């Protein structure tokens, strides 16, 4: 079975992908510095704790294991933090990626799936967004992803590195029974914050209700993390078959507003969500929904979770289990 190196495999989306890779019989090694990821997300014998910037250590590892491909998640993801510390984001996300690509070149690993983001589009002019939409990030985080994508285009041309960049929309939910779920510290994402509001009684803030959308709140494309993880496996398999480089949106194509998310949580939990309306958050586009047509055509991918309440139910199960284990 193919040997896959997963960087950032102790994080939220990375660990779900590792879980699915192992289930499908892949030979997986995880590299994570555990600065944001969690040791408990990965089987210990699979984990190598090291920094991506440590090119020498990566070369050693790649020389020893002889990976067939890399799935590269390791990055910082908080948009707000990236506006406060842009240097940190360029150093970690761009510098870390360059170090990885250098080690891959030195050791002849020529297949990569890259964890990109819909943040590369900034505020798109047309929705649903296709991959041909202009790249116009509005945060250092989005720019860091766009820079790596651009780097990959040149490495494809002059270095023979074949890659698939997956532009994620809003990942959420948890794989039932896996023990994995969303655990960012601090948490900034809507669904876990809404679920915590239910559990603690502390109101969640809705960032703006005066957008030009039907209920005034922002619309996003919420995709279940297991559907997202599966896109990585299909992408890596395709690359291993010899497919050319590509860039693909990963979303469901269906948008929900913030208020619709709150209502879905109320249905699933049977409890009222305490919330207040706050000001808009800087850099939030009113509507961000994927056109996933290209992903469906090239990888034969279809989402298993098409219903928001089912997605919410998996996240709720995880939050409750976490509370019981505390
Ligand atoms: N949001 C909100 N309150 C929060 C967190 C998020 O109203 O405490 C909104 C945010 O403005 C956006 C949506 O929820 O419209 C999803 O935000 P999130 O941070 O989860 O993901 P993003 O879209 O930024 O990737």
Image (spheres, grey):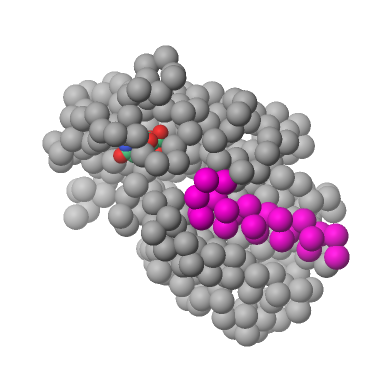
Relative to 72, residue 222 above or below: above
Q: Is residue 224 left or right of residue 114?
A: left
Relative to 116, residue 272 above or below: above
Place residue 64 in its image quadrant.
bottom right
| Residue 265 point in image, percent of width and height | 30, 27
Relative to 145, residue 313 above or below: above
The quadrant of the rendering that contains the C terminus is bottom left
The stretch in magenta equals 137-158
Place residue 105 in its image quadrant.
bottom right
Q: Nearer the viewer, residue 17 or 163?
A: 163
Q: Magenta region, mostly helix, strand or loop?
A: helix
Place residue 71 in its image quadrant.
bottom right
| Residue 138 point in image, percent of width and height | 52, 45
Q: Residue at x 59, y 25 (%)?
A: 127
| Residue 167 point in image, percent of width and height | 61, 44
Q: Residue at x 83, y 67 (%)?
A: 159
Q: Residue at x 56, y 73 (%)?
A: 52
User: Is residue 191 at least partly visible in the picture?
Assistant: no
The residue lying furthest to the top in this view is 214
User: Is residue 286 at least partly visible in the picture?
Assistant: yes
| Residue 238 point in image, percent of width and height | 77, 48
Q: Nearer the viewer, residue 49 or 197?
A: 197
The quadrant of the rendering that contains the N terminus is bottom right
């Amino acid at each position: 079975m193919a040997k896959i190196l997963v960087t950032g495999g102790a994080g939220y989306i990375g660990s779900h992908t590792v879980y699915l890779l192992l289930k499908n019989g892949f030979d997986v090694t995880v590299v994570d510095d555990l600065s944001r990821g969690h040791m408990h997300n990965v089987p210990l014998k699979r984990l190598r704790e090291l920094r991506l910037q440590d090119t020498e250590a990566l070369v050693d590892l790649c020389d020893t294991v002889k990976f067939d491909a890399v799935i590269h998640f390791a990055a910082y993801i908080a948009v707000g933090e990236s506006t406060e510390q842009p240097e940190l984001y360029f150093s970690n996300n761009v510098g870390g990626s360059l170090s990885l690509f250098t080690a891959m070149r030195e050791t002849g690993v020529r297949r990569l799936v890259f964890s990109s983001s819909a943040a590369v589009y900034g505020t798109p002019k047309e929705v649903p967004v296709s991959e041909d939409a202009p790249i116009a990030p509005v945060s250092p985080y989005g720019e860091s992803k766009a820079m790596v994508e651009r780097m990959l285009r040149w490495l494809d041309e002059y270095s023979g590195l074949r890659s698939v960049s997956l532009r994620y929309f809003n990942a959420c939910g948890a794989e039932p029974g896996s023990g994995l779920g969303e655990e960012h510290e601090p948490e900034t994402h809507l669904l876990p914050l809404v679920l915590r509001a239910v559990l603690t009684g502390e109101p969640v803030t809705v960032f703006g209700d005066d957008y030009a959308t039907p209920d005034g709140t922002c619309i996003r494309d919420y995709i279940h993390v297991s559907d997202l993880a599966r896109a990585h496996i299909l992408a890596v398999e395709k690359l291993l078959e010899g497919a050319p480089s590509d860039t693909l949106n990963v979303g469901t194509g269906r948008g929900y507003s913030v208020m619709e998310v709150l209502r879905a949580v109320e249905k699933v939990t049977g409890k009222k969500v305490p919330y207040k309306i706050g000001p808009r958050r800087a850099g939030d586009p009113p509507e961000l929904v994927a056109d996933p047509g290209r992903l469906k055509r090239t990888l034969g991918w279809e989402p298993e979770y098409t219903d928001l309440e089912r997605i919410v139910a998996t996240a709720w199960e995880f939050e409750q289990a976490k509370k019981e284990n505390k």
